Image (cartoon, helix red, strand yellow):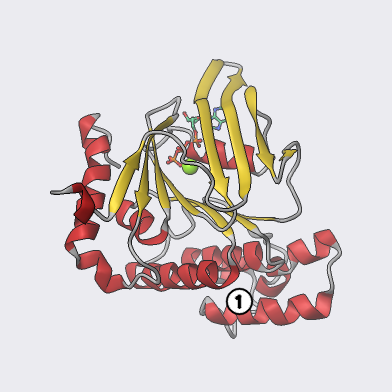
Amino acid sequence: MPAAARRFTVISRDEPARTRRLIEIRGLSKTYRTRAGDVPSLSPVDLDVDEGEFIAVVGPSGCGKSTLLKLLAGLIAPTEGEVRIDGEAVREPPDNVGIVFQSPVLLAWRTLLRNVMMPVEVRGLDRATHLARAHQLLETAGLKGFEDKYPWQLSGGMQQRAAICRALVHDPALLLMDEPFGALDAMTREHMNLELQRIHGETNKTIIFITHSIPEAVFLADRVVVMSSRPGTVEAIYKVDLPRPRSLEMMGERCFAEITKEIRGHFYARGALD
Ligand SMILES: Nc1ncnc2c1ncn2[C@@H]1O[C@H](COP(=O)(O)OP(=O)(O)OP(=O)(O)O)[C@@H](O)[C@H]1O
Ligand SMILES: [Mg+2]
């Protein structure tokens, strides 16, 4: 089809910043040293992310997506290279970041509400303001009425929704999300996708979002980063020019099918579709 009619562009390297650059990833690599030997898990990655941008990361299982996110969050140290957020090299978890892990990791001895309030306590933020925010987030996530329950009294999907509330409660400028909706049923997942799009649109948060779902990546992202097999690196970047806000109906349109098909092609090419 003619290039002008395309709603997406393939870009081989970063374009110049449109707004303020928030994240700079330079030559970032990670090799885990284990008793059984070295496990190279991330080949050098270079990527810049602008403030307010929504980046989705897709790649085969085990290619290093969670590793990349943990490096961005300052939870593990790189073998080589560095991550800079707001010009500062990341050496420990920065304050202004919210993280949703691949599994919910809630504290078993805390109620849902007290789990959600954790980042507020850890950072010593104003309790009253954030309590109201926590209640509002729990309501949005369909967890109203469960504030006083313990994690083991809830389903896996409910726990994951609570973990998302916890990542948002201190209103971080940067959200790092590792397959946050993977455990949710299809309807809840669609609802959460719309909610996340709304939050992104209203708050100008920068979001790095890992997913195994290519349609989810295209629905949410400004750019979709496709990673290669382990040790993963950036194989391609797709800029998604679909207008916002995006509706679920848009997922049935031709332009949407074209971009998902093209991205899926990367996986089929190497026989590694999850
Ligand atoms: N702490 C660790 N020690 C040793 N090896 C590790 C460690 N964490 C991850 N790995 C290895 O590094 C590679 C990348 O792991 P990672 O969890 O980043 O992959 P992923 O892309 O997130 O996979 P998935 O899609 O299944 O979540 C894997 O081969 C994994 O076994
Ligand atoms: Mg992972």
Above or below residue 221? Residue 261 is above
Q: Secondary structure at mark 1?
A: helix
Question: Residue furthest toward the left?
Answer: 1
Question: Residue furthest toward the top?
Answer: 37
Frontmost residue, 40 versus 202: 202
Disc 1: which residue: 137
Frontmost residue, 242 versus 209: 242
Q: Position of residue 236 (x, y in %)?
A: 36, 36
Question: From the Cβ of disc 1, is ligand 2 less than 8 Å away?
Answer: no
Name the residue: 60% across, 20% down.
34
Above or below residue 145? Residue 177 is above
Name the residue: 69% across, 78% down.
133
Above or below residue 168? Residue 32 is above
Name the residue: 44% across, 60% down.
181
Relative to 250, is 16 on the left or the right? Answer: right
Q: Position of residue 203 (x, y in %)?
A: 59, 69
Q: Position of residue 139 (x, y in %)?
A: 57, 82
Relative to 142, is 118 on the left or the right? Answer: right
Q: Quadrant of the C terminus?
A: top left
Name the residue: 55% across, 15% down.
36
Q: Quadrant of residue 187?
A: bottom left
Q: Residues within 10 Å of mark 1 (few under 14, many from 20)?
A: many
Above or below residue 147? Residue 19 is above
Q: Amino acid at mark 1?
A: Leu
Residue 138 appears in the picture as rendered: yes
